[in-house]
Image (tube, helix red, strand yellow):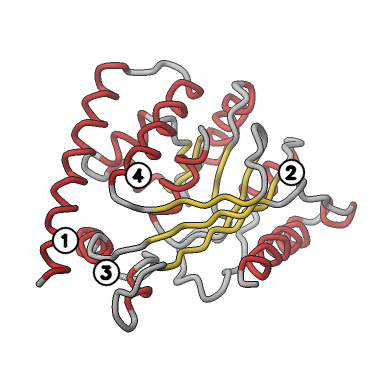
Amino acid sequence: MLRFTRSLLRTAKLFALLAFGAAALFIRRPSTRAARADWLHRFAAMLLRRLGIALKQTGVYPQRGVVISNHMGYLDIMAFAALARCVFVSKSEIAAWPLIGWMTTMSGTVYVQRGRGGSAERAKRDLQAVSEENVPIVFFPEGTSSDGSSILPFRTGLLYDCIEAGQPITAACIRYRLTRDNGPGAARHLPYWDDTPLAKHIFRLLSLRGIEIEIAFADAPIAFSPTALADRHTAAAKAHATVLALRSDQAL
């Protein structure tokens, strides 16, 4: 009963914070992606703080170029944005989500529409525009989220587009943990990767105490070999191995 009450109160707080953020965004209507990324950074940092979610960083968040990471759910986006201003690449379906879709669009997200002609070229143009504003680009090459027990193979398309564009690509790895006792099996409610309805997952998540998110960044951009530069699958394997190495370091 205590967990249910905690979740109910935090859910009410979440809706109030989202409404406040949406109103502020509607009033300000930042015109550049850099300004939109700055708004998202401030909003995400405030949201995690008010919900009692701790954020830990190891390594240096690059100020430009591309950041790639493993993906465990919607908390990843809030965590990366809370650390520093950035622009995300996301599947186009999110744009249609009520309120959240409008907020992600207004915050400068670059959408990729799979299987639709011309989408990749539009995404390339948008990514180039973000690069020219000196805002780091964050995306998740797995293409979907997982439960965190492993890192799925990386998709090659967008990753290789960034390599061909000469963007420095820095690896990062995100990890969730509970620092307080929430009962057996509670940690399984942290990632969002299965068919659980989003609202149900958020309600469960907000019942947990001691949520901590850690993001580790590599010391330098990935050094791709000439073979990797010439072959997208080799490049994806190299990027995957670099993120996996960070994950291994986090487990120590």
Image spot of residue 30 (x, y percent): 38, 18
Residue 6, numbered label: 1
Residue drawn at x 20%, y 58% is 199
Assess disc 1: are there few (<14), some (14-19) or many (≥20) residues with their C-alpha within 10 Å of its C-alpha.
some
Secondary structure of residue under mark 1 = helix
Callout 4: few (<14), some (14-19), or many (20+) C-alpha neighbours within 10 Å? few
Report the disc number at residue 163.
Answer: 2
Query: For the C terminus, which image quadrant?
Result: bottom right
Residue 81, given in percent of the width and then of the height, sits at 46, 40
Q: Identify whether 93 is placed above or below 206.
A: above
Amino acid bearing label 4: Arg
- For badge 3, the amino acid type reads Thr
Measure the alpha-carbon separation of dots 2 and 4. 35 Å
Gap between marks 2 and 3, in whole Å? 35 Å
Chain-order first, disc 3 or disc 4: 4
Q: Three-letter amino acid code at disc 2? A: Ile
Between 63 and 207, the one nearer to me in the picture:
207
- Circles 3 and 1: CB atoms closer than 8 Å: no
In front: 34, or 175?
175
